[in-house]
Image (spheres, grey):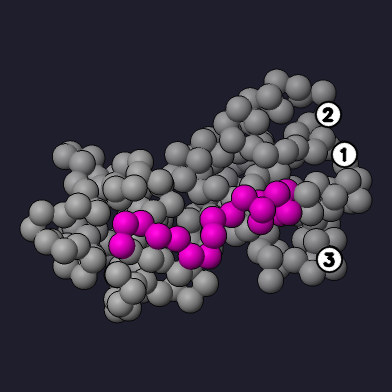
């Protein structure tokens, strides 16, 4: 089922959105402030986010900027007040995909949600991808090297996918920690290094001289495309 997160502090509006979208068959969750919204994005990775801009704790602009900086690519539909053209422009520049202006009609909102989800599905990465001699099958959460299955622990697989999703860009240890482990206090950056070492042992031809998962000094890691 398609999962939608509504980040909205107006309880009546959030309730109305939840009811109408659930009637259409979506799985809905509501976060009443920006900090909680960001936490749920990191933990549940919804298929779409409906985001109010004026939020307590963490406003929608900062939430949106943080999402995109952490490489969360799900579409974002922002809710803006009537006449606030500058908010619309700022939101789109920060990475929002579309907006609706309050007050809005339910049919307009549903049409925009459906359009964003169709566009996202068309642009989503293939269920199977190859990086060198490594093949990742996202549908089955399996990995093979030169055609031979590789047994990865769940967090090792999630870490590999997090690196693959960046298409060769560097991911800091903090970014990987947030994306793969969430905000668990027990997770420290040494955990990242340990899991990277295990991934290299299982995927690299020579783990001591890695050619696939590269260390970027004082920053983090990246996957070689």
Residue at position x 36%, y 71% from top? 143
Is mark 3 in CB contact (under 8 Å) with mark 1?
Answer: no
Specify few, some or many for label 1: CA neighbours under 10 Å numbering under 14, 14-19, or 20 or more.
few
Residue 199 vertical position relative to residue 114 in the rendered view, above or below = below
Q: Which residues are magenta?
A: 116-133
| 123 is within the stretch colored magenta | yes
Checking the image for residue 160, the label placed there is none
**Could you tell me which secondary element the residue under label 1 belongs to?**
loop
Query: Gap between marks 1 and 2, in whole Å?
Result: 7 Å
Instruction: Kindly identify which residue carries mark 3.
Output: 24
- In this view of the protein, which residue sits in the foreground, 148 or 97? 148
Is mark 1 in CB contact (under 8 Å) with mark 2?
Answer: yes
Q: Is residue 172 left or right of residue 70?
A: left
Q: Quadrant of residue 98?
A: top right
- In this view of the protein, which residue sits in the foreground, 95 or 14? 95
Q: Is residue 184 visible?
A: no
Q: Is residue 35 left or right of residue 101?
A: left
Residue at position x 68%, y 65% from top? 2
Is mark 2 in CB contact (under 8 Å) with mark 3?
Answer: no
Instruction: Kindly identify which residue carries mark 1.
Output: 103
Q: Where does the image place residue 116, in percent across and percent down from the top left?
A: 73, 48
Residue at position x 31%, y 57% from top? 132
Query: Gap between marks 3 and 1, in whole Å?
Result: 20 Å
Q: Nearer the viewer, mark 2 or mark 3?
A: 3
User: Which residue, as the protein is rendered here, is positioned at the far top?
Assistant: 86
Instruction: Kindly identify which residue carries mark 2.
Output: 82
């Amino acid at each position: 089922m398609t999962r939608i997160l509504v980040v909205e502090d107006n309880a009546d509006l959030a309730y109305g959105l939840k009811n109408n979208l659930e009637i259409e068959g979506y799985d809905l969750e509501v976060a009443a402030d920006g900090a909680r919204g960001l936490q749920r994005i990191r933990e549940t990775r919804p298929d779409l986010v409906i985001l109010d801009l004026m939020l307590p704790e963490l406003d929608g602009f900062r939430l949106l900027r943080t999402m995109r900086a952490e490489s969360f690519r799900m579409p974002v539909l922002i809710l803006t007040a009537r006449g606030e053209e500058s908010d619309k422009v700022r939101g789109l520049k920060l990475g929002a995909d579309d907006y609706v202006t309050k007050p809005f009609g339910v049919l307009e909102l549903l049409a925009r949600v459906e359009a964003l989800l169709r566009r996202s599905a068309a642009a989503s990465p293939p269920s199977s991808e190859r990086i060198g001699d490594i093949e990742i099958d996202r549908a089955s959460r399996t990995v093979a090297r030169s055609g031979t299955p590789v047994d990865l622990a769940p967090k090792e697989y999630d870490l590999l996918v997090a690196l693959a999703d960046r298409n060769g860009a560097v991911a800091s240890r903090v970014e990987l920690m947030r994306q793969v482990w969430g905000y668990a206090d027990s997770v420290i950056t040494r955990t990242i290094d340990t899991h990277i070492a295990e991934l290299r042992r299982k995927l690299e031809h020579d783990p001591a001289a890695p050619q696939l998962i590269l260390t970027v000094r004082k920053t983090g890691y990246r996957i070689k495309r």
